[in-house]
Amino acid sequence: MTGTADRVCVIGAGPAGLSAGRALRRLGVAYDQYERHTDVGGIWDLDNPGTPMYESAHFISSRKTSGFFGFPMPESYPDYPGHRRILDYTRRFADAYGLREHIRFGTAVTGVEQDGDGWTVELGNGTRLPYRAVVCATGVTWTPRLPHHEGEFAGEIRHSVTYRDPAEFRGKRVLVVGLGNSGADIACDAAAGADAAFVSVRRGYHVIPKHIFGIPTDEFAESGPQLPLKLEQPVFKALLRLLQGDLTRLGLPKPDHRLFESHPLLNDRLVDHLRHGDAVVKADVARFDGTKVCFTDGTSEEIDLVLYATGYDWEIPYVSEKYFRWRDGRPELYLTAFNREHRNLFGVGYVETNSSAYTLFDHVSNLVAHHLHDQEHDPGRAARFEEMIARDRAELSGGIRFVDSARHRSYVDAKTFRAYLARVCGRMGWQELTPGMFDGLLAEGAAR
């Protein structure tokens, strides 16, 4: 491949990379895209090596509030689609907008280095190519975080990234460590199929049902009156108490934070399993002792399999850490995308939020594409935005005091984030996401 110095390199063809590709295509920004796997879909493809996906995985945001902008999920999908439908939907998206023709599959990127005003990208086969800009879009759930506990364990220890099917639990006494959304799902699988199922938690969580009065919870929240946060928190807390009762009587610790101040835990099944005794909540793990796991409350259990659902470390392994400023394991990027210190090195998908991510990817990709388009067609406006990148300090929490943890250091409130991005578009004279803006690409994709 030659003549790449005036093009943009997009790395990754999961949802974030596809979002970036569509935004660049719409504005006619020339780009190449690299994907190490054999097809699009990212983590949603169970055949993609290293994916954290498992058979029972579903979206935790509902069909109507999720998905790419202007490309809704089919009405035939259930309220919370499973991973196979999400993968099919993602591939339909790539086909509809003609994105595949820009992607080189089976091609890993192994290095990115700054070279003057541009960047040199090294491929897995050793080829080195010049690009004017690089968009990193390879996701954040590829490097499992595995804690260490004292003692020796005679059973099996694994991270949830290795988990696929509930049949793996048959005939075993299983301990799931961690109660994020994946941990809750997997604990439910263990409750249904293991000889005994336990889930170890360090702190209390607000468990939010996926439906309120038969309506998907995120739809319910968006369709009702938009209350100030100081009213919304007690109103929803009271509603949850009315619907669920006191969850501490099921063994769950009382939350040490207010509602909405941590990443939402949406799960209906876990509460049901706890009520029926199919799963049992345990305290934090203190140590291992042969076939026993000892907990900080002084209790212990005989366990065959410890499955750590303890999350993932964010990494961009093909880019030296000197090019990103990392804080608490998160790259510090303006509006979650723009590198303040190294021009034209972007990230799409490096965001923690309390809403569906796909549409947020589109909002961010829209700004990245506009800025790259301006560099060629309106250098003065591009320079003004680069001043914003260097100086602007956006407050994106929406007034929510998120819990003091590494995960929540860079957390954004989705409503606040979208509103701020709209203001940026207004200041720069860029087009916001509006219905029909990608329809021209749809026609092109359908013609292929």
Image (spheres, rainbow, N blue to C red):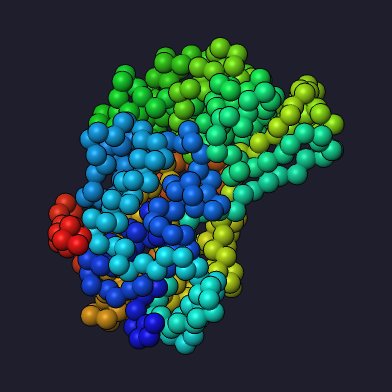
Query: In which quadrant is the C terminus drawn?
Result: bottom left
What residue lies at 59% left-to-right and 39% top-to-bottom? 163
Q: In the image, is 276 to the left or to the right of 430?
A: right
Q: How many marks?
A: 0
Query: In which quadrant is the N terminus drawn?
Result: bottom left
What residue lies at 41% left-to-right and 29% top-to-bottom? 233
| Position of residue 59 measured from the top left corner of the image (x, y, whole percent) | 40, 38
Q: Nearer the viewer, residue 419 or 356?
A: 356
Q: Residue furthest top?
A: 276
| Position of residue 356 measured from the top left corner of the image (x, y, whole percent) | 37, 43
Q: Please, is residue 369 above or below residue 52 in the view? A: below
| Position of residue 417 measured from the top left corner of the image (x, y, whole percent) | 35, 51
Q: Please, is residue 121 above or below residue 314 in the view? A: below
Q: Nearer the viewer, residue 95 or 316?
A: 95
Tell me, yes or no, if residue 382 can be seen here: yes
| Position of residue 69 measured from the top left corner of the image (x, y, whole percent) | 25, 50
Q: In the image, is 387 to the left or to the right of 297?
A: left
Give residue 325's quadrant in the image: bottom right
Q: Please, is residue 337 above or below residue 113 in the view? A: above
What residue lies at 44% left-to-right and 47% top-to-bottom? 44
What residue lies at 76% left-to-right and 23% top-to-bottom? 301
Q: Nearer the viewer, residue 193 or 153?
A: 193
Q: Nearer the viewer, residue 368 or 440?
A: 440
